Image (cartoon, coloured by chain):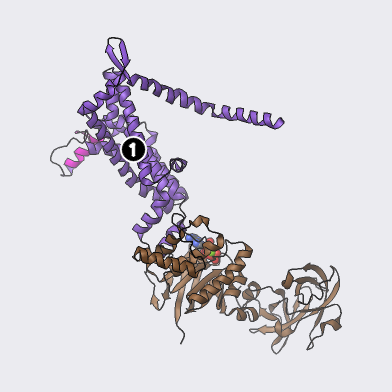
Chain colours: A brown, B purple
Amino acid sequence: MTTFDLEAKALSKRFATHTAVDALSFGVERGSFFSILGPSGCGKTTLLRMVAGFIEPDGGDVEIGGRSMCGVPPNRRPVNMVFQQLALFPMMSVGENVAYGLARRGVARADRERKAAEMLDRVGLPGLAAKRVDQLSGGQRQRVAIARSLVLKPTLLLLDEPLGALDLKLRERMKIELKQLQAAFGTTFVYITHDQSEALVLSDRVAVMNSGRFEQVGTPQELYYSPATPFVAGFVGANNRIDGQVSAIDGDLVEIRSAAGWTVKARRHGTLKPGDAATIFVRPEVAVLGRSTADLALAEPAAVHQGTVESLLFDGANSAVLLREQASRCEFRVALPQTGRYADLKVNEPVFFSFAADRAVCFGVGSSHG
Amino acid sequence: MAKATASASQRLILWLLLAPALLWLFGLILLPHLDLALLSLRERTGPGEYAFGLAQYRTFFTEPLYWDVFVRTATISLIATALTLLLAFPIAWTIAKLTRGRLSTLLFAVCLIPFWVSETVRTLGWMILLRETGVIPGLLVTLGITEVPIEMLYRDPTILVGLVYTSLLFMVVPLYGSLESLDDSLIEAAYDLGGNGWTVLRTVVIPHASPGITAGCIVVFMLTLGNYLTASLLGGKNSLWFTEQIYTQFITRFNWEQGAAFGFLLLLLSSVMVWTGLRLSGQRFSDVMSRT
Ligand SMILES: Nc1ncnc2c1ncn2[C@@H]1O[C@H](COP(=O)(O)OP(=O)(O)O)[C@@H](O)[C@H]1O
Ligand SMILES: [Mg+2]
């Protein structure tokens, strides 16, 4: 049986007329790294602050470590929070920051200084206890903020976009460090972010949030390869989107025809009937590219589409090419093979592309919100 | 060459910009004080004859009345400053942290309203309320709290109330400034790590606000120490307030030398108090001044 460190039960919060968190229920397994991924304004911070106890929910309950947190103030909850702007105390030294929570618990000075120093060692900041907070670099501050919480051995650590303020290079490094820290301490992390790459890289499970609700909860692989809603398909990873009407249904496959007259086949998600409005999502790396139809070398027969190169998007291993489909003038993005083949494509060059219909997914419009 | 003239003209502009401030400082503060200093060190040896001497300062230390009044003024000023701080802190906290927009502007205006009326009129208003035949003693009798109307004027608590009321705004403003700049997430983080109201106040809020607290205390202490009107109107002729002694020496006794010496002793007192205050709170004068 799995034990949950955090369980939300029909948790809701309304601000005036706006529902920030809409009757959410979910569980976070002990020792896991759980992310909540969603665009800004979708209610992530509100949700996290209800778990931490800074916002009183309008309805529902939060259970932490199996105990209801109804009416428990933030300073009595077995959770700690890493704030978006870190909120380190500038009036105290690094050591005092880390020892702050221990001091509030009445741990003796010598004891808490020793524990703070040990914790600083564990997060890779040995001997920095006497420094002032403003003498640290961005990455070091990040680690102090985490150390300050983890030294209290919370059941749950909440992190509100903690990497948001860092520059790209540092963010990449801190991502890895964060994952290693979580593995080393085994504390349950609840991490919120609007950056899908952070969520995918770090998490055991990810909840994709939109307008106060969870669209899908699953492993990063599940979200990426089998999105449950058009919103998840569009939000997680790059995706080509083709809107149209269902023109034929063939078992699990549907054929849709876009307004501009492009016919595409894809795997059906949910029930659809001819004439329904539908949207197809195709990942750029699912499509193959060729200068001639012979180049496509398809394992199984699939529709071959024709297009011209609109622009080349060189980004090392993530390079792609933006095409325009011949007939419909629809934009379509195809990942370039890692071999460096087709690196010499020219703008306006005519090309062929194709993708297996069962690796594209089709959602009926209105079959699901979003 | 061109650069040299540019910097020379820049320097000229700088001096011109500073000129009003320097004139003010020199002409209205430094010069009169120099004059007072010389005056205080002048000893009258005969009618119209003077010599250099410390007689005025000697009088201060040998005459117990003067010394008592001096200590009393300092003590009451300190108490008034502390009370003002206690009263102003929740007000500043409310304006800075608990209210937004219109409401906080309104609260500020409420603190400012007393200053739309001149200090004299304001204090006379207090006298109407507090004198034996006034509103408040009458009310106390009507409510059956006292049997006969009591005289509330000319008592130390009354002087304190008046001084605190007059100083409140000068404490609220610097406190507001330093509390406003305190990031709310620091307070939340302190709670999150297990702090309670008192420990958060002691470990996060007060250390952050201490330049503002010190600045407010200095301003209020100086204002109270130098206050003449409130102390003498609410305290009466025998309020035993040091500025009143100075006034008496200058105006009633026409003993300018003694008055000047008292003035200097008062200046010395406030300087020593400010210095001690800064020392005790571990603040630097420049930090504090940037908060006022
Ligand atoms: N205190 C508040 N009062 C009114 N509306 C709020 C308040 N806090 C958040 N909101 C609204 O709730 C929504 C969700 O906010 P938030 O939880 O901060 O989103 P996120 O963290 O996902 O960006 C936003 O539309 C925001 O404007
Ligand atoms: Mg947020």
Majority secondary structure in the magenta region: helix
Label 1 Cα neighbours within 10 Å, binned few <14 / some 14-19 / many ≥20:
some
- Identify the magenta region: B128-141
Image position of A284 (left or right of B182)? right
Image position of B200 (left or right of B4)? left
Q: Position of residue A160 (x, y in %)?
A: 52, 66
The residue sitting at 31% across, 13% down in the picture is B50
Task: Check if residue B217 falls in the magenta segment.
Answer: no
Q: Position of residue A312 (x, y in %)?
A: 79, 68
Compared with residue A3, is residue B100 higher up or lower down, i.e. above or below? Answer: above
Tag count in the figure? 1
Going by the numbered disc 1, the residue's amino acid type is Met
Q: Position of residue B278 (x, y in %)?
A: 38, 42
Task: Check if residue B139 falls in the magenta segment.
Answer: yes
Asked which secondary structure carries label 1, the reply is: helix
Could you tell me if residue A237 is visible in this image?
Answer: yes
| Residue that badge 1 annotates | B273
Q: Residue furthest front?
A: A127
